Each structure stands twice: as structure tokens, then as C-alpha cells.
Image (cartoon, rainbow, N blue to C red):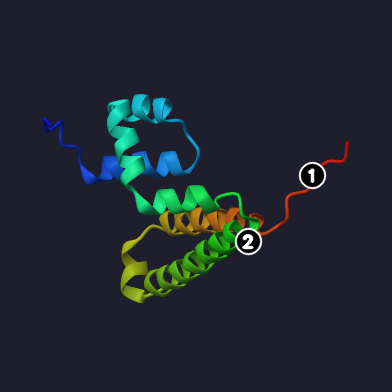
Amino acid sequence: MTQGRAYPAATRAAVLAAILSGASVSDVARAHGVDKGTVSRWAAANTTLATMRNRERDPETIAAAVYDLIVDHVRTMRAQLDFVTSTDYLKEQPAAAIAELFEVEGNVLLRLLAGLRPVEVPEE
């Protein structure tokens, strides 16, 4: 078998993340400039992706994953807060940059928290 083009690890990670999020192989291949066969092989060889595909419809699995993301994000925000509130850091940063950081982090956290709400299916 001939060796194809070498792709950066970041490209492979982005491709697998897109597949995991539900994008089609064709769309992902086109968006990232990677051959469809390569995308398919990467997806087939990725055990995390295969496991998630098998469990992706399980509401308890999804809820646990969202909860884990929220916990990780809150921990990250706490660490960032500890860092950006240090006197040395604050002296060197414009207030607008700090405000923007916390606005972005807050918005992401709110979106993750919204994922904990059960989906309301409209009655027909």
C-alpha cells in the first residue's frame, strides 16, 4: 500500500471532531481538504469515535458528557480567574481584554449549562 499525504495532528483532530459532531464524511473531507477515503479510515480507526457512535443516542451518556464538560469548564474558569486577578497580570492587561475573556468564558458556560435542561418535545 502506498503512503499518502501526511497531515498535521491538528487536521486529523479537527476532522475527527467534525465527524463526531455529526458531519458527513463528504462534508468534512471537503471542508478540511482531506480525501474522503482518508477521513473514513481515520474515523474507522478511532476507538473513541466508534464508542461514541454506539452510545451517542443514550441520554444518560450525553448528560454525563455535558456534566463533565461543565465541571472542566468551571475548573478552567477558576484557574483563569486566579491567574488574571494577580496584581502583576492586571497591571499589564487592558481592562477590555480581561472583560472580553470573562464574557466569552461566561457565555460558553451558560451554553453548557443549557445542555442540562431536558429537551422539550412539542406535542403533536
SS at circle 2: helix
Residue farthest toward the right in the current orientation of the protein: 124
Task: Looking at the image, tell me whether mark 2 or mark 1 is earlier in sequence order.
Answer: 2
Q: Is residue 67 above or below residue 20?
A: below
At 51% across and 62% down in the image, what residue appears?
Answer: 69
At 33% across and 69% down in the image, what residue appears?
Answer: 89
Q: Which residue is mark 1?
A: 121
Q: Which image quadrant for residue 110? A: bottom right
**Could you give the CA–CA distance between mark 2 and mark 1, rounded to whole angstroms?**
17 Å
Residue kind at label 2, given as amino acid type: Glu
- Where does residue 109 sit, x and y in percent of width and height? 56, 59
**Relative depth, front residue between 27 and 83:** 27
Q: Is residue 62 visible?
A: yes
Q: Is residue 85 above or below residue 100?
A: below
At 63% across and 55% down in the image, what residue appears?
Answer: 115
SS at circle 1: loop
Q: Nearer the viewer, mark 2 or mark 1?
A: 2
Judge from the rendering whether residue 68 lies leftward or rightward of residue 47; answer left or right.
right
Q: Is residue 17 above or below residue 95?
A: above
Residue kind at label 1, given as amino acid type: Val
Q: Which residue is mark 2?
A: 60
